[in-house]
Amino acid sequence: MNEMTLLKLLADDPRATITELADILGESEENVVAVKTDLEKRKIICGYHTVINWDKTNEDHVDAMIGVSAKPERGKGYDKIAERIARFPEVSALYLMSGTSEFIVSLNTKTMREVADFVGTKLAPIDGVSATVTMFVLKKYKVNGIIMDMEPEIEDGRLPVSA
């Protein structure tokens, strides 16, 4: 079985059933389960996620992106700092970046105060962190390839006319 084809199918629709995947791939259900389980064990498949438009719920929800400037440790680079940041439950994503900040930290909390407290009491004091820049997400238009809340583009079928 082609693992890349299975991965692409799951990336497009993580809710696809084993039966559906087996039909598309032309494989037995047992083979699909075995390959999928192996991909999970090898941490190639790391999870299955639901995209939620929190703006349409009554739940308080704040997303923030924090640029973190840091100095690498001799012999360990940025990994030690990244490990410390990644272990905080508030952190939903952490990326080593090129550009003005070494890291981008994605945070999901209920209030802006929780973001401020996280930055001030947990993130900024980490050895090696030299500066932070916090940005709050004001509105999400597209997340993980999914358009959140825009009206569909209407095509009226007319041909453009030029003079």
Image (cartoon, helix red, strand yellow):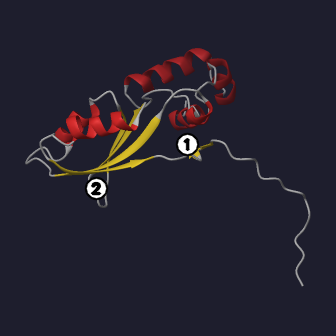
Disc 1 is placed on an element classified as: strand
- Residue 36: x and y in percent read 50, 23
Where does the N terminus fall, quadrant-wise?
top right
Q: Which residue is mark 2?
A: 101
Residue count near mark 1 (Cα–Cα under 10 Å), binned few <14, some 14–19, many ≥20? few
In the rendered image, residue 101, in percent from the top left (x then y), is placed at 28, 55
Horizontally, is 57 left or right of 107 in the view?
A: right
Task: Name the kind of residue labelled 1 in the image.
Answer: Val
Please name whichever residue, 60 or 79, is drawn nearer the observer in this view of the structure: 60
Q: Give the percent coordinates (x, y) of residue 94.
A: 33, 41
- Quadrant of the image occupied by residue 115: top left
Which of the numbered marks, if any, corresponds to residue 143?
Answer: 1
Q: Quadrant of residue 10?
A: top right
Q: Residue furthest left?
A: 74
User: Which amino acid, by three-letter code, is at mark 2?
Assistant: Ser
Local secondary structure at mark 2: loop
The answer for how far apart the CA atoms under marks 2 and 1 are is 22 Å
Left or right of 142: which side holds 24? right
Q: Return the disc, 2 or 1, that comes first in the chain's sequence.
A: 2
Q: Residue at x 63, y 41 (%)?
A: 148
Residue 135 is situated, as x and y percent measured from the top left of the image, at 39, 50
Q: Is residue 147 above or below residue 87?
A: below
Q: Quadrant of residue 54?
A: top right
